[in-house]
């Protein structure tokens, strides 16, 4: 009865002028399902002209004539609304769709009749159409709205709204995409009006997003740490290759006594740094007593070599065999440390060839 009071006699008897059908069809419009343009046109005319309409759809500021059989067949919810409607204007039953722009309701109803939509109107009313299609169970339109949003209509400005609507309208994939979008562009999204509203109206969702933001950040840091670590192990692998090469072939001005050094350019990038270590190691006065920091580093490189070396007796790297013998007597804790290092360097090496 409430709706009946709101509609004046003049409103109900003279519906607003209908937009021209040819105008609609000339715009960039798309039709789903209906292949035949003649039948599309017929359905569009039936809606726009309201021929023999027996239902009036009342919006905030508009009254749209429609047909109970079409609306009822398309939507079980509308079927119920029409059946239960106590408001009538003449022989026409009245149902009301409020809370969304008038034009969104018109676009929604036109889609029900013709499966057609205008792209510009879709861009403008996609969120309203999503809600309407969910509420009235028009699955084909709901699917279309979700697709349009997923592919091209989510923006920094609307993503917070879309996320909330996607949750409300049970569109999990769309919600997931929005969630990921917010995480990726949080700085920009958090400055929007939509985010401010979400924070206020849905603190639980805000908390959930902040938590996954922190989780994503720590995952990113962990990934960076692993990349950095891998780089170090790859460098160590390079140093090991250069060490064998220097001790076997000689490089630049340093090499085995029995080799004539050609001083030619070398393909091992680690040679240069290693050369200065070896020179220092050979001449350092403190070496015998454990040595200075550089010497200690050299000892470690030699020990690492001995653990990676598969040549055993033929190996030209100094102290390789001695280290291998010493390694057998090492305590468990040190042994574990070295084994881990060997595994990491070997892994880095195999990841290169992968
Ligand atoms: Zn070299
Ligand atoms: Zn030293
Ligand atoms: Zn060796």
Image (tube, rainbow, N blue to C red):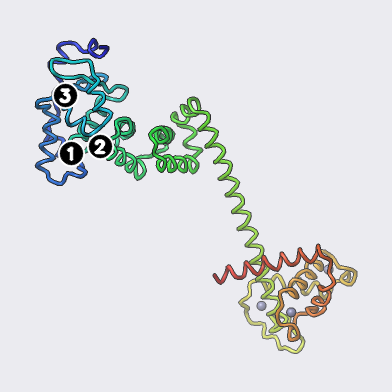
User: In terms of image quadrants, where is residue 32?
Assistant: top left
Residue that badge 1 annotates:
27
Name the quarter where the N terminus is drawn.
Answer: top left
Instruction: Pick whichever, 215 or 233, lies toward us.
Output: 215
Q: Is residue 296 left or right of residue 153?
A: right
Residue 297 in picture, x, y percent from top left: 78, 66
- The response on whether ligand 1 sits within 8 Å of label 2 is no
Instruction: Pick whichever, 106 or 68, lies toward us.
Output: 68
- Badge number at residue 65: 3
- Badge number at residue 177: none
- The response on whether ligand 1 sits within 8 Å of label 1 is no
The tag earlier along the polypeptide, 2 or 3, is 3
Residue that badge 2 annotates:
120
Name the secondary structure under disc 1.
loop
The tag earlier along the polypeptide, 1 or 3, is 1
Residue 352 in picture, x, y percent from top left: 57, 69
User: In terms of image quadrants, where is residue 20?
Assistant: top left
Residue 222 sits above or below residue 316 on the image: above
- Seen at 66% across and 62% down, the residue is 232
Q: CA distance from mark 1 to mark 2?
A: 9 Å
Residue 48 in picture, x, y percent from top left: 14, 29
User: In terms of image quadrants, where is residue 321?
Assistant: bottom right
- Seen at 71% across and 64% down, the residue is 340
CB atoms at circles 1 and 2 under 8 Å apart? yes
- Seen at 15% across and 46% down, the residue is 35
Q: CA distance from mark 1 to mark 3?
A: 23 Å
The tag earlier along the polypeptide, 1 or 2, is 1
Name the secondary structure under disc 2.
helix
Instruction: Pick whichever, 138 or 150, lies toward us.
Output: 138
Name the secondary structure under disc 3.
strand
Of tags 2 and 3, the one toward the viewer is: 3
């Amino acid at each position: 009865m409430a709706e009946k009071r709101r509609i004046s006699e003049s409103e109900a008897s003279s519906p607003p002028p209908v937009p021209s059908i040819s105008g609609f069809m000339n715009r960039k419009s798309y039709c789903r399902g209906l292949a035949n343009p003649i039948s599309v046109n017929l359905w569009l005319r039936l809606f726009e002209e309201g021929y023999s309409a027996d239902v009036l759809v009342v919006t905030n500021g508009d009254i749209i004539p429609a047909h109970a059989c079409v609306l009822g067949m398309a939507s079980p919810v509308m079927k119920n609304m029409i059946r239960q409607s106590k408001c009538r204007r003449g022989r026409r039953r009245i149902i009301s769709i409020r809370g969304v722009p008038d034009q969104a309701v018109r676009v929604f109803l036109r889609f029900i009749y013709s499966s057609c939509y205008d792209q510009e109107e879709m861009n403008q009313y996609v969120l309203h159409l999503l809600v309407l299609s969910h509420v009235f169970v028009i699955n084909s339109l709901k699917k279309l709205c979700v697709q349009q949003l997923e592919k091209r209509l989510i923006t920094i400005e609307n993503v917070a709204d879309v996320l909330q609507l996607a949750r409300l309208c049970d569109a999990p994939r769309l919600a997931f995409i929005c969630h990921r979008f917010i995480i990726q562009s949080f700085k920009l999204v958090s400055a929007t009006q939509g985010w401010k509203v979400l924070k206020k109206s849905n603190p639980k969702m805000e908390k959930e997003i902040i938590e996954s933001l922190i989780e994503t950040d720590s995952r990113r840091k962990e990934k960076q740490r692993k990349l950095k670590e891998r780089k170090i192990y790859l460098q160590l692998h390079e140093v090991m290759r250069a060490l064998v090469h220097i001790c076997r072939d000689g490089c630049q001005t340093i090499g085995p006594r029995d080799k004539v050094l050609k001083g030619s350019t070398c393909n091992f990038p680690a040679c240069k740094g290693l050369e200065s270590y070896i020179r220092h190691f050979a001449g350092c006065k403190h070496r015998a007593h454990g040595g200075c920091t550089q010497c200690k580093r050299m000892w470690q490189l030699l020990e690492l070599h001995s653990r990676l070396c598969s040549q055993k007796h033929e190996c030209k790297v100094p102290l390789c065999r001695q280290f291998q013998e010493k390694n057998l007597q090492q305590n468990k804790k040190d042994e574990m440390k070295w084994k881990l290092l060997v595994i990491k360097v070997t892994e880095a090496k195999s990841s290169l060839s992968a």
